[in-house]
Image (spheres, coloured by chain):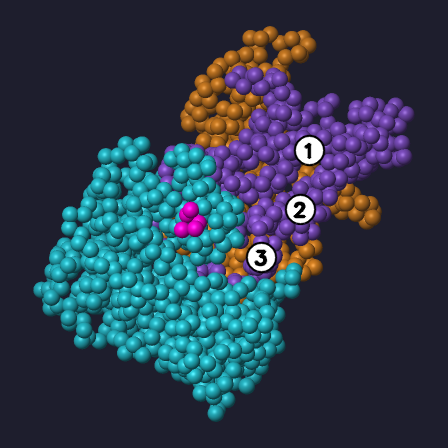
Amino acid sequence: MSMNAQQPADRGADLAEDLEPTAHLIAEKADTTASQQEKAHRPISRGRLVWRRLKGKPNFYIGGAIVLAIVAFALFGDLFNIYTQGQQDSFNFNSPPSAQHYFGTDAIGVDLYASMTSALRTSLLIGFLAAPTATLVAAIMGSLAGYLGGPFEMFTNWLINLLLVLPVFYVLMIVSPAIADPSNLPGAIQWLGFMPAWGLLVIAIGLFSWMIMAQIVKNQTKSLKEREYVKAARYMGVSTPTILRRHIIPNVASLLIIDGALGVAGAILAETSLSFFGLGIQAPDVSLGTLLQDGTGAAVSRPWLFVIPASFLIALLTGVALVGDALRDAIDPTSEVNRA
Amino acid sequence: MTQYILRRFVNYLVLTVIATVFSYIAASLFFYPRRRYLGINPPIPEESVDGILSAYGVNDKDPVLLRTWWWIERIIFEPLSQKLGQDLQGNWVINEIVGRAGTSLRLLLLGALLAALLGVTLGVWGAVRQYKASDQIVSYASFILISTPTFVGGVILMILATNFNQLLGFQMIRFTGSYTPGITGFFPQLWDGFVHLLLPTIALMLFGAAGYSRYQRSLMLDVLGSDFIRTARAKGATRNHALVKHGVRVALIPMSTYLAYSFGTLVAGSAFLEIIFSWEGMGKYGIVAVQTSDVNALAGNVCFTAILLLFSSTLSEVLYAALDPRVRV
Amino acid sequence: MPEPLLQVKDLTVTFPNAKGGVRAVRGVDYSVGEGEFLGIVGESGSGKSVSSLAVMGLLPSSAKITGDITFRGESLLGMSDRALSKLRGREMAMIFQDPLSALTPVYTVGQQIVEALTLHDKNVPQRSAEKRAVELLKIVGIPAAERRVKAFPHEFSGGMRQRAMIAIAIANDPALIVADEPTTALDVTIQAQILEVLQKAKEVTGAAVVLITHDLGVVAGNVDRVAVMYAGKLVEKGPVEEVFHSPRMPYTMGLLRSVPNMLTAGKERLVPLEGRPPNLANLPVGCPFADRCPAAQDRCRTTEPELLADLRDGREVACHRSDEIAAGTLKPSDIFPRPPHEERAVKDSTGLQPVVKAQDLIRHFPLYKGAVFRRVVGRVKAVDGVDFEVLPGETLGLVGESGSGKSTTALEIMELVSPQRGSLEVTGKDVGTLSRAERLAMRQDVQIVFQDPMAAVDPRMPVGDIIAEPLTVHGVPRAERDRRVVEMLELVGLDPEMTDRYPHEFSGGQRQRIGIARSLITNPKVLVLDEPVSALDVSVQAGVVNLLEDLRDRMGLSYLFVAHDLAIVREIADKIAVMYLGRIVEYGPVQEVYETPRHPYTRALMSAVPVPDPTIERARRRILLTGDLPSPTEDIPGCNFASRCPLFRMLDETRQAQCLGDDPAATVHGKSKVACHHVDEIHRLDDADISALSPIPGD
């Protein structure tokens, strides 16, 4: 459109003539160009720039350390424990944390430490699989809706708006009987029955939590579509799939990375909530949600049964949120994409 | 202006209908109420089970779309109290909703209101004091609070309250159920209601406020560097005056949309709290409906929630239009 | 000499970063007397805005400021925000560049003016403050002020918003007004209006004005004294005539010689000022301009010259060789010699097949309303029936203000599909009849260069891939593509070794060259250039314009050159089409149209363009247009320029009726086509007095 084509001649470029929030960014940019001149032939890719900024964020280290420690515990924690998940120690019912049972035992002598490693593996697995699934769906739906416009965009808009009146958790609740017992799968998708419960949870969470992100990707795509290099590609005769692959997706990738990271927390939270209310992972399998459910009744009398899984859950989610936040700051969609 | 709001309302109304019908169909597909009557000794003859299920309109032998049609027909033609059919306990769903709505709304509305107020205040305050210690503390606290599911937060508050009561030597904070049966008199009842409301409201408020404060903070940070703040200061307003009169006012605009989007999360969070605190509210009704494969009860629940969200979304549109002259047509 | 109103001494501003900081301002001294009009000129990143924000105390708290700023003898640095706030708005006011973002969107214009009053006088009654707001709006020439005072900023056009900003600035009769690029975001005709309003504001309040701008033309016509800023320092200062006529700092000379001048364009070539300003985070020792200065000596690279008043003639220069320059032994023409100008022969165009031919081309956009149930509520008539042709080897300049439809016209050609109405022929073929394969093949012949060098290239692709992209469509093998990329880089004057670099490592001018290289790689016959230089700094513009001229003549290219800058169009184009509201109002050979403009809009447009020469600029008479561009959704039965036409207001009733009732068709006058009923009356504009502040009839 030519309506506001005319730009002020030295728009935005005035070094350090922006204000507060961007001042440090500009200083940083100037910094980058400075070092570029020093080592002439080493182009600094965007990835490296993001990485460099990420390294300056304390949240990234704190969050990263928490997540890594919990993942390591889930994977290797069993090496330091003689009990396996579900194994009962009939001499130690309701034992508080001790040298023998690091995290104590429950009313039937099940070792909480062993349950925790197993539960964390399940929850982490779901989190780290469901979030990318949702992000993928969001990327496809959002970029297509944004680039194609028309009826497909209308359809996507309706789906996204449905979310406004139907909380995602209700949708997950409705499909939860199939997760608890795959025989409840309706006829058409009965073949998914081979999946373990966590697999079905991954699918359910992945399929129903992409909407907000798709909305953001869609808007971003629409603005990218108006970018001159995308128009230029179109005028060169580059085909739509190639434009999406070459110009659109790489340019929304940073948003998707952030969403993927933050989505992990959302997915774990969704799994935990479902399982907590007996709608997700079922005994004898354990997840953070089932452990919390078991621990709630004993929260006052035998606090370790509740406090330990609760602390792990909160720590894990906080860690993921901190990493996601640091990523967002480093990639900085508002200052980089919109103000560029 | 009124026309605009009205149009949005109709738009949401259509969405509400779609959402409710959609969840009825989905629930019919995924729920298997017949299981309740299987494996019982002595076995109930299949015809009797069919009879019971058909009476509720949830017989899986009838095609899903046909059942959906019957359900819609009932909504259109039956008297008000019977519109949403019966739950598997034999109660009219509408009656259940009417009986439980007050309990749920009390917690939800109060919690949401306090969460919004606290969240906005903290967000603005944090942004103005960006990078100072107090901002950092609020930031980390809200990260932890966002990461604490309401059902975990509720239980933690219960543990704390128990210890507090032990310290006092008497049950000052009561947190089981939404009221203590048997209390008479207006003021005792009011106080009792307040005491019971305390913990779940705090839990909901903290959870909601954590999210709102992060969002409000980032909105405020965007606004801090904007040209109109600079103009206001160039006119002679002090930094703080400019931030409050011009900054906050503009930063509140996107918040009104965010409130609508996040209200669903609060509804779910408050449902969890109802169960933790053993309140007989809509949340509990919903989760029990899923646990017992009660299609009608669940559809009623979704319908209630959707109407609630319909009003909250419309309210946020009104708020948006009130805050931003650019959308007033 | 009386004490100056504002005195800035050795001002430095540093934005801290990991490596010590960006020194945006490095020791600036200047003073402004009561009622004086000072201009500060500089390119992007020169620190001109930062230094003025420092004066107002509006820099972010992270900025480290040293030196001294005194206002009426009172030191401003170190004053508390509260104390400064008492001065700001009352004694010193500021006008900002972008009037849309500078006004708070949620308060009415009136409320914002009233606030400026009540902040400094708590006792002023609301009613009288409101009355004063209406008065102020009247002073700055806003029609129907009583009604408009209740409007929100988004209901104002850009020009009206800037008027409102000025109203706010003069509300308390300040002694100093700082105007930071006040017209940069506006069209030339609006710019001319705003500059007049600024002059009037100065008269009304008697305030001193500091005008910060990158536009030498704006400075030339308005200020008394001018200061030139480069890399955070003032490099030359003096009375505006002297600085413009006998610059003493090579940077000033380069700048003046690189600026296109509407009066001389097309007769002599622009002088490019090579290189780019130094990085303020990493300044070289010595004179920061030394790298770009053809007259640099060894001492320039070792010691930085101070701004000195050597000759005691009221001028200050920061150059080691200023004595030679002042003595006349080192002349501007020695330092920046003009490249030889080749007169473009007026070719015999008869019988030539046009490469682009548009007939009655229209492009309307439906206007939607409603998010869910979308419905069409109107049409934006972006392009509303234009005819033009581009001949081989020829450049057609398409000029107009924003909203005139010139860019839409250009993009419409790039689509290569049947227009909504009318016809479009490219290289002799009607694009409506093309098959898919033919259309794809034709895309090689028609390429585009965009305005914004930041947005025109994908930031994530290496330069080699960017330039080769058009070839990927046509199945050219990799080795051939690489060979062509190297060729193209050399052609546009970039280092062929740079193929694996990313766009962010290049300056704006270099990126624009990358865009040009990409457009040329398919050996096109015609290039559509959509504002190719308007986002670049003046010193860089000249290089790109010269490159485009050379390429055209060397490769026999045809250009459709879309621009709002009339001087540049005169420089490069053979023919010109002036667009207004989706129509071409005047179309003809450049020389003829510039020398004898026949349409009142063309006249007004040309008189609004400032010329970077204070003597000429002050002697020129302006034809100022009233009001703003009407909405392109409006249905106007008659001439769509009538509402703003200066000629219309001088006509008798029958002639006016003709304008209002009858849409003028283009008629031939000389070698031009003009869409005006009253071409024979155009001389009446020569002796009329038209001001932006006179009320619009009927409003």
Instruction: Kindly indicate the quadrant of the structure image that contains residue C662.
Output: bottom left
Q: Colour of chain C?
A: cyan
What residue sits 38% from the left and 69% below the top? C337
Using the image, determine if residue C104 lies above or below residue A233.
below
Looking at the magenta stretch, what is its main secondary structure? helix
Dot 3 lies on which element? helix
Magenta stretch holds residue A304: no
Chain ID at mark 1:
A
**Few, some or many residues within 10 Å of mark 1 (<14, 14–19, 20+):** many
What amino acid does circle 2 point to? Leu
What amino acid does circle 3 point to? Gln
Magenta stretch holds residue C488: yes
Whether discs 3 and 1 lie on one chain: the answer is yes
Q: Colour of chain B?
A: orange
Q: Which segment is the magenta one?
A: C487-491
* Residue position for label 2: A322
- Percent across and percent down for residue C179 are 43, 72
What residue sits 43% from the left and 39% below the top? C481
Q: CA distance from mark 2 to mark 1?
A: 16 Å
